[in-house]
Amino acid sequence: MKQKVIIVFAVSLLLFTVYLIARDLFRHPASVTQANCCGDDYTELKKFDTTLVGYSKAGIIETSLKGLTGIAVDQNNEIYVCGNKIVAVFDSAGVLDRSFVIDTTASCIALGEKWIYVGMGPAVSRFDMAGKKEESWDPYNSEGYITSIAVNGPYVYLADAVSKRILKYSGDGHLEKVIGEKDSTTGSPGFIIPSMYFDIAFGAFNDLWAVNPGRLQVENYTTSGYMQSEWGKASFEDGGFTGCCNPAHIALLPDGKFVTYEKGLDKIKVFDPTGEFVCMVAGAGSFKGNTDFQLGNNNLVKDIATGNDGRIYVLDAYNQIVIFKMKD
Amino acid sequence: MDNSRKIKRREFINKGVRLGIGVGLGALAIDLSTRSAEGKTIWQIDPSKCVQCDKCSTDCVLDTSAVKCIHVTDMCGYCDLCSGYLRTGTKNLNTAAENRQCPTGAIVRKFVEEPFFEYTIVEELCNGCAKCVKSCGAFGNGSLQLQIQQNLCVNCNQCSIARVCPGQAISRVDRSTPYLLKGFGGKS
Amino acid sequence: MKHKAQLIMLIVVISLITYNVLAQQIQRFPKPEFESGYQTPLTQVSKIQPVFFEYLDMFVLVGCMALMTWLVLKKRSRKAVFWLTVFSLLYFGFYREGCICPVGSVQNISMAIFNPGYVVPLTAIVFFIVPIIFTLFFGRTFCAGVCPLGAIQDLFAVRPVSLKPWIRYVLGLIPVIYLGLAVLFSATGTDFIVCRYDPFISFFRINGSSLMFFLGAALLLTGIFIARPYCRFFCPYGVILNFISRFSRKHVSITPSTCINCKLCENACPYDAIDKPEGLSVKNDNRELVKKLIIYCLITPALVVVTGWTASKYHEDFAEVNFKVRLAHELTTTGTDANPADIPTEVTTFRSSGQPLEALRKEVDKIIHRFNIGSWIVGGFLGLIIGLTLARLTIYRYKDDYQPNRGNCLSCARCVDYCPVGKEINNEMQIVELKKYD
């Protein structure tokens, strides 16, 4: 009798383990979701008060190109984009006007009166309006990387993120000045560039505005390299910049206001010349793509530019040009 | 007589089966071992597929996960406002304990010179939760990356984290490339 | 000479150009300018464990196998087998923490056969083949005490009870199913279920989930009464060794020479693996048995089809264990406008990775198709084993002595101590080992 009880008990225990294994194998637990996962929720930080939005979407241009990195707009509101071995020009209606092939990937583009300046790695090349390469200037630093170009009259200013300097070239390719070295005489605190985002633009008064991303501020320089003023602060409020290196891109509106793109939270804001927050343009929700997870370099915006009609042109990560106009 | 014939027949069948199995096994062994010369035999995380879901800290068979955060110093910006060190969205921007990202205090910050700070990870304290990886990647350069520390990993036949990884980021790699660090050694 | 110099110059120039081009394409991070001369530290990563240990495992395995075989077949000493069992438990179990083991290697091999891209580690091949080769010639000496899972169970078999044959045959179908599922899941690249539900690894690592600990504890508890439950009624590798052992050249025998039918070994085996002599009287019902045999042989194909069809009915449930299949399922059921906080992480990851959904769907269809075929085969295999077992039961084989059942015997050599042949019986009626007998 005792034998039978033992057998029954042991066999039942054995069959119970079979059941447990089968249950664990075939029953699938509920998936991890954003709600019950860990870490800070950036979706909350990406939100903003919609009453602060001063711009609305005017249109989207699908370029059907690949690997676009930079955008610039000329006086006739023609849109120039540069990218993986290509420069293309679209008219204000979004129709492709012309395009030409370049040797390597362009990192940034700027427009002079007669020339198109395209930054390619450590050097810059100059093309005429038809797309013929006029010349390539020798790089200041062979390991450098040009992230932004600004044209002022006959001078061309290059922002080199690796050298952490702004290089002033004359029209014939001669390096005139190196701006941005930490120097108490010029007043420059030195550029802190943690990542390849270093943007410059020219203001209405012929003054050079440069982002100092590591200090989260935008600095104003004379054309001879003296720092005159700066604005910007580190803060999670609307009026500040977040993260380690922001704003990633800036552009100047015709009335002197700044359009800034903040990477990480993907916010485009407008500031007035004294650095006061004016309004929001757009946030992560206005652009294609999802940046909740780190799957490679996933900023939603690649570059911004402004037209002389006050419109803001945004090149997004999916090679589309999104145009914003001021709300009435 | 009858029996001995039966026994002989049985012996013959047995011998035949043995030969068959032996040859079959031999062929299998040769075929598979020629493949095994490539030797993808250790587990590693691909940071470009990692979604920082925290399963690395909970699903490893070891008590303290073999997954640790590695700081790729070549990529670091040495920022004052390090998003891997400081939590995002905090009211005050200071280094008080409640403002720090790492729940175990494994990231140590040291002043270098104005305005640069050096950040190092104390491996014994890191539990592989990827909170710092997520914020460094989202707001910074992405120099903090999760990797399986090969001296801690017991190299299970089936990695139990690999089974549940939402990005399917863990796979076997060759012994010659035990670490897959993004941006390190020229990889972008 | 001039041409050589020119060629070298050309190579140098080309390599410089290529380096430059490559340098431009790599995304670099601008190093901060440190004025104080601070040197950025190198990235710290730990060294991989030397491959020496894997090779050591293979040598120890072969060594233990050879030693165990000699101890069981030639030296015939249960005591020595016991101590080697303890050593195996300590080395393969607690020191190497039970991974990799031959039981799991079945999955590696099966995955390699059906997935040409998969590379099997050399240790897995060796761990799969070496015990089979030894079993082919000497019987299941691996099971005797080299396998760490067997070793730990063997030590717990303190109060074994005898199970009736029908219970053994029914429970013996579980490892067949387990083997089938293990091969199915590893062949489709889904999972290694044997490793996942290895009951004793939580004891070897002294670390694990509560399920794992419970499985181990339950099997050890069962093992006190039903000796070696995992070996006899779970182990998928045991199915293979069982089959191969039937054709082994040599096998452990209870008696060193001729059996004298003293019946002293009848209750010696805790695993019910000793076949008793079958009397001549049974031979008279030959015709009945032949009829039964023919019936079973005819039923077997029908049985195969029935079990195969039944198993294939569940092929989608089996397929759900596969990550990609579950992912595709979730992608279909989760709309793009659902609340972001409630979307499963895998879905968001897939959607932001930019991979086309169609490619995933195609792959998943292929996987489900493979599961369909695989389920038919696994079910059919089960039916085949059932049919063959029934058929084999009818085969009468005249036996006039006590022999270990070639398939089921785990070569633990316990029975050897019970046999008085070649040993003296001392005054206290105890069997004493004769020092020189051959």
Image: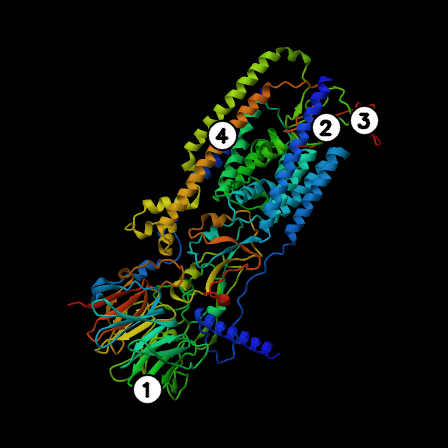
C34 lies above or below C214: below
The quarter of the picture where the N terminus of chain A appears is: top right
Q: Amino acid at mark 3?
A: Lys
Residue on which disc 1 sits = A223
Marks 1, 3 in one chain = no
**Marks 4 and 2, the one that precedes in the sequence:** 2
C-alpha distance separating marks 2 and 3: 15 Å
Instruction: Name the mark nearer the viewer: 4 or 2.
Output: 4
Q: Amino acid at mark 2?
A: Ser
Chain to which the residue tagged by mark 2 belongs: C
Residue on which disc 3 sits = C423
Marks 4, 3 in one chain = yes
Q: Amino acid at mark 4?
A: Gly
Q: Give the SS element for disc 2.
A: loop
Give percent across and percent down for residue A120.
39, 74
C-alpha distance separating marks 1 and 4: 84 Å
Marks 1, 4 in one chain = no
Residue on which disc 4 sits = C380
Residue on which disc 2 sits = C253
Instruction: Name the mark nearer the viewer: 1 or 4.
Output: 4
**Marks 2 and 3, the one that precedes in the sequence:** 2
C-alpha distance separating marks 1 and 3: 109 Å
